[in-house]
Amino acid sequence: MSNNQPPAQPPLGQISFYPAAYDPGLLFPIPRAEQRATLGMTGTLPFFGMDIWNAYEMSWLNLRGKPQVGIATVQVPADSPHIVESKSMKLYMNSLNQSRMAGPEAVQSLLQTDLSAAFGAPVQVMLSTSESFGQTLMGELEGLLLDRLDIEVNDYQPNPAQLKVNTNAPPVQETLVSHLLKSNCPVTNQPDWASIQIRYTGPAMDQAALLTYLIGFRQHQEFHEHCVERIFMDLLTTCKPTKLMVLARYTRRGGIDINPWRSNFSLSKMPLNARNARQ
């Protein structure tokens, strides 16, 4: 396999042979534009944001051949032209397992170069080594829990027509949370589990209707990033908030979790990359 060209087919859903040597050609970029076009996004994006990847199975060798371990965090801007298929990311990172590196800084620099090329935009990479594992942030998403509501659900595909707002009351500012978001991989149909936080200002959303809509992703097939953008666009178009932020934290698969967030207003800083109980 070439070290410069991505594989012709995504590795997801295929039998994989784990590489014995470093190979950035394993990374498989997927254009964002096609999926965004189905959501009506063909020009300037109606949001900004980041996809935050955490890779927990990072390992390499020091110059004497002793294994080293770390946790890599990759921040990918939402306006990058590509996402990267997650199994290809796992295979790429595992290709470093037998690579001798001068130190964590060299690994971080290599990841930043290779991943920026694959995503088509500069990404930021942070590498935590075992000495700092105890400083890993933990915490649940803050907000009013939608899951407390006793609702009946019969539709397990996302249906924005279910969303409702109260236009007769003054605008509200709310932060809502659910742990019931589940979608499925569009290639393997394996389940993807997530907690989601929605922060908005505007007409009050009907919370039962919103929870019903979110549960509707349960049989939907789409990548993490696409699901979050679909939710953002459905809420923006149907509920018409003046401010909107959507953050999802997905449970890890293959040692990697992906946490997309999208916003159309300044949060003053990016949401904390704090692992929740299911991560």
Image: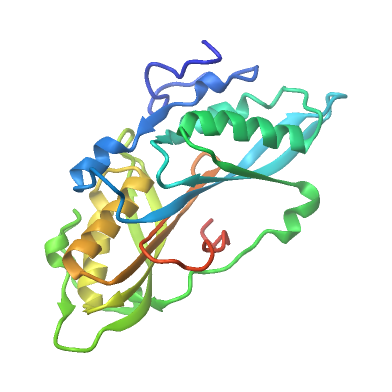
Scheme of image coloration: rainbow
**In the rendered picture of this protein, how many numbered marks are placed on residues?**
0
133 sits to left or right of 213: right
Say whether residue 207 is visible: yes
Say which quarter of the image contains residue 31.
top left
Q: Quadrant of the C terminus?
A: bottom right
Compared to residue 141, the image places residue 160 above or below, namely above
Say which quarter of the image contains residue 188.
top left
Instruction: Looking at this view, name the residue that lies furthest to the left.
Output: 161
Nearer to us in this view, 43 or 75: 43
Say which quarter of the image contains residue 114.
top right
Residue 249 x %, y %: 46, 57
59 sits to left or right of 277: right
**What residue is at 40 percent from the left and 35 percent from the top?**
82
**What residue is at 20 percent from the left and 56 percent from the top?**
158
**What residue is at 48 percent from the left and 69 percent from the top?**
141
Compared to residue 194, the image places residue 129 above or below, namely above
Compared to residue 76, the image places residue 178 above or below, namely below
Residue 168 x %, y %: 14, 87
Instruction: Looking at this view, name the residue that lies furthest to the front.
Output: 44
**What residue is at 26 percent from the left and 61 percent from the top?**
215
Nearer to us in this view, 29 or 216: 29
Residue 20 x %, y %: 64, 17
Instruction: Looking at this view, name the residue that lies furthest to the right.
Output: 64
Residue 77 x %, y %: 47, 46
Nearer to us in this view, 241 or 28: 241
194 sits to left or right of 43: right
Compared to residue 86, the image places residue 154 above or below, namely below
Say whether residue 260 is visible: no
